Image (cartoon, grey):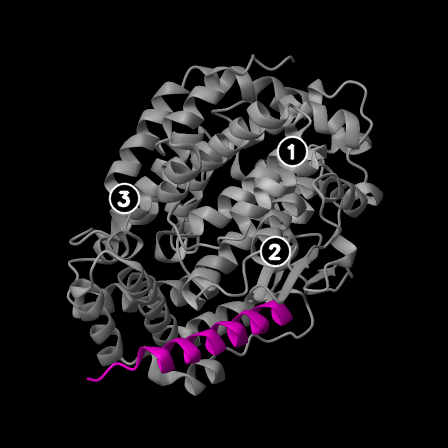
Amino acid sequence: MSLDLDAYRLGAETFVSELDREYYLHMAGHKPELRIEPIYERHAGLFDRGQVAAIREAAGAARADEGGRRLRYLLAFALDGLLGRETRAEAEEVARLEATLEVETSSTRTPYRQVPIEQANEPEPQRRADLEEARDRLLAARLNPLHLAAMERAQTLCCELGWRSYADAYADVRGVDLERLAAQTRAFLEATDSLYPELVDPRLERAGLPPLGRLRRADVPRFFRSSELDPAFPADRLVTSLEATLGGLGVDLRSQSNVHLDTEPRATKSPRAFCSPVRVPDEIYLVIAPVGGRDDFAALFHEAGHTEHYANARRSLAFEYRHLGDNSVTESFAFLMEHLTEDPVWIGEVLGVESPAEAVAQARASRLVLLRRYAGKIAYELELHAAGRDLPSMPARYSELLGSATRIRWPEAPWISDLDPGFYVACYLRAWALETHWRRALVERFGERWFGVPEAGAWLRGLWSQGQRLSAEELLAGELGEELDFEAVAGEVKAWPPAAG
């Protein structure tokens, strides 16, 4: 079929903006239902199988120039869109159920999306476990059939389009060697294996939680919440500390007319902060449901990293470079900002904490749990999405791989819901590695107080202005002349001192 790239790009940008706006309105609690099916219907021509095949053919024949780069990004978009269109009914129903279901225990009824918040603030271990079991029963009975139907349809479509498997499709369109990345994360697990309990168990004990090996997933939100650190991370300093930090980098958050800060409480608002880049760089939403505590600060700063990256992208960039590309890049800036909430200099200067060692040790322990969890996730997702996998065995395999990586008693129920679409898990892992390089360069060039140096902000804005034209590997090589490798993360972790009990 004929391929009008100019018309396709115009339609694609309109579609992305409409879809992101709909997700913002739903996830921010402005509307109870997620209505994405009408959006896909209005733009059905973008994701016709023939259209996707034509873009794939054009991308395969393209030269290694800017035109070829844009085509490869469009191919990833077209594949995502086709799979999204074909699974839109399930996505809408999952969103509706998550926004309306209540988890019932013997003593309480809790909105489905509020369970992690309840667990984070619940001191009684039995109630945390009851909430987990009740939620997992709902997940298995009401949500997992929808997740499974969507996943199997997506896997089938990838094969019908000519790829051997879903995993092969996304390794191709993302331009990432997923097996190599998984090997690097296996090496990370081995390199940090003996350090893991040394760094995490003292923090678990301090939080009144069981050690690794006996810790349950129901306890993890409580661990991340680290309520004993609330005095150091007060809710009333959440937004002001972000404003002060950005101000030190030469960014006035309140005067950014393209950034909309949404902090209003709403019953169905997502409990986790998120960024919605409706129109890059002209209309960006930063959304948070303030709770307070270290984890809340980390979430807000993470999403602020996305926000500033999108808000500072050059308006003249092609659509593909503003909205598409390698999301490891935007995630690296999100992790860079998030890391400030575990930086002892930042904690001392911005939050006024005289002895930040406890907060630093907690943040590092939490991050190591998360890193090891994602190392387990990529191994699991590669098995789940490989050709010829044994589907009935996958719930147990999920529990085994996640449990082995984290040493946490991991349930089977989330085996099909705990997935990152399109192997986004690889974006997170590569972003953690890239962030390590950015932070090292900032400290070397501007000192440990780089977050208060306007010249550091100018350097970051120069990176942000490029949008996602370059891949993580290309951007790092061009800016610092270095090679992206997960070993950088392992090296940093091995340099951490053991946590004090």
Q: Position of residue 307 (x, y in %)?
A: 61, 54
Mark 2 and mark 1: Cα distance apart in space: 18 Å
Give the class, few, some or many, for how many residues have Cα within 10 Å of label 2's Cα (few <14, many ≥20).
many
| In-front residue for pair 364/58 | 58
Residue 160 falls left or right of residue 20: left
Q: Which residue position holds label 2?
A: 274
Residue furthest bottom in the image: 42
Q: Position of residue 79 (x, y in %)?
A: 31, 67
Q: Which residue position holds label 1?
A: 340
Q: Which residue position holds label 3?
A: 178
Indicate whether residue 44 is drawn in magenta: no
Give the position of the C terminus as an image quadrant. Answer: top right
> Which structural element holds mark 3?
helix
Question: From which residue to which does the magenta span run?
Answer: 1-26
The quadrant where residue 119 appears: top right
Q: Position of residue 274 (x, y in %)?
A: 61, 55
Mark 3 and mark 1: Cα distance apart in space: 29 Å
Give the class, few, some or many, for how many residues have Cα within 10 Å of label 3's Cα (few <14, many ≥20).
many
